Amino acid sequence: MSRFFDSTFDDFRYYLVYLPLGILGLVRWACWLLRRAPAALYRPVKNDFRLPIGVVVPVYQEDPEIFAHAIESWLANGVDEVVLVIDVTDDACRAVADRYPVTVVVTDVPGKRDALRRGWEACGTELVALVDSDTIWAEDVAAEVCKPFADPRIGGVGTRQNVYNPRGFLQRVTDMFLDYRYFDENAGQTVMGRAVSCLSGRTAVYRRALLLEVSDAFMSETFWGVPCMSGDDKRLTTLVLEHGHRTYMQRTARVWSTFPRTPRIFFRQRLRWARNTWRSDLRALSHRWVWRHPFLAYTMIDKGVSSFTLLLSPFFMTYAILREDWFFVACLFGWWWVSRSMKILPHLVRRPTSFFLVPGFVLVSFVMSVIKICALLTIRKQRWLTRQVSVQNGVVVRTAPAADRAEAA
């Protein structure tokens, strides 16, 4: 009997080193449940409310076939106006636009922000949908995004977004992340105070009067003295909330966009997004207005903390492999697979075969945590992936001649 207790005690001490991971896991699951419980209560707005709506699209070196498909999807929705703000170098997209009943504004000013501003100033409708040039709408998006605006407090409405015709591992994983976002984070923020942290620029709808009101603040944004070039969707969403309005996610409005297939472009895009998120959330948490939305503040803090805590799990996995503790390795790997499957269940219901991609989804999550930390360390850097522009001496300028830009596209 004594040998039995001695053996049990030795086994306990052997596995005691993994106790911090277990405690952290319980804490992280509790944090996730605090977000997921309200998200489960989400319901889209249902009514017959409708306002005139226009579409504003900044266009730069877009794939002509995708661009044409996107224009046709917007027009099929019966929108009142489509304003395309096309870069002066983009002859191919101007030729595509000439085939449709749209308004074209040609700009020689580099950068997306100025194009957005020119677009909503040229658009005359009460609601303005800011849309990416590769974003394709379902047939009822215009009707669905109007419904939340029946509440006069709503200043901006977001849509549910997925990858257009996903192919390959990275696009499938991106589709998983998007479903996780719209069934978890955005749904919970909508329920708990109608304060969504980011209305994604792929399609976000605002009251035009509000866009005109925040235009100067939008164009003059800086972070630690550096003019902000990207992160326009986060900035607009923050300005709407800061001015006392609400933001809402209407999940019945579905859109699809293209996403990178190659690792280099995929992770560079994630790096840019992470920098934008850090800048926006850190600024918001330093201002009083965000604390009027406690759940929003909580999700911002939780997202920042998780960038660091998530990396402890692969650290313990590596440690277990070095110890040749194969039982723990198998248990932890199985837990990663099962727990992540539970968190992305809405996506697995839509695409059951993605269950076999969950280990890859977990691996990409770990890499993205590293990227988020790198983004925090390089938070002042401003760079676009698809636009050859940068901030030089405090001014947004082109970084490549037209021939190089055409080749890069």
Image (cartoon, rainbow, N blue to C red):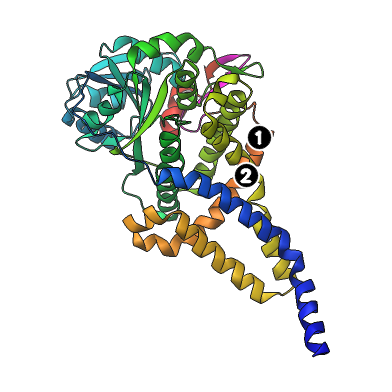
Looking at this view, is 28 or 53 the one in front? 28
Q: Residue at x 65, y 16 (%)?
A: 225
Instruction: Categorize mark 2 by other alpha carbons within 10 Å: few (<14), some (14-19), many (20+).
Output: some
Q: Which residue is drawn at 50% across and 33% down?
A: 385
Residue range corresponding to the magenta coloring? 384-395
Q: Residue at x 26, y 11 (%)?
A: 124
Quadrant in which residue 22 is drawn: bottom right
For the C terminus, which image quadrant?
top left
For the N terminus, which image quadrant?
bottom right
Q: How many marks?
A: 2
> Residue 172's spot in the image, x, y percent?
40, 53
Q: Is mark 2 on a helix, strand or loop?
A: helix
Looking at this view, is 231 or 42 the one in front? 42
> Residue 103's spot in the image, x, y percent?
24, 16
Query: What kind of residue is marked 1?
Result: Leu
> Residue 112's spot in the image, x, y percent?
44, 21
Instruction: Categorize mark 1 by other alpha carbons within 10 Å: few (<14), some (14-19), many (20+).
Output: some
* Residue at the disc numbered 2: 307
Query: What kind of residue is marked 2?
Result: Ser
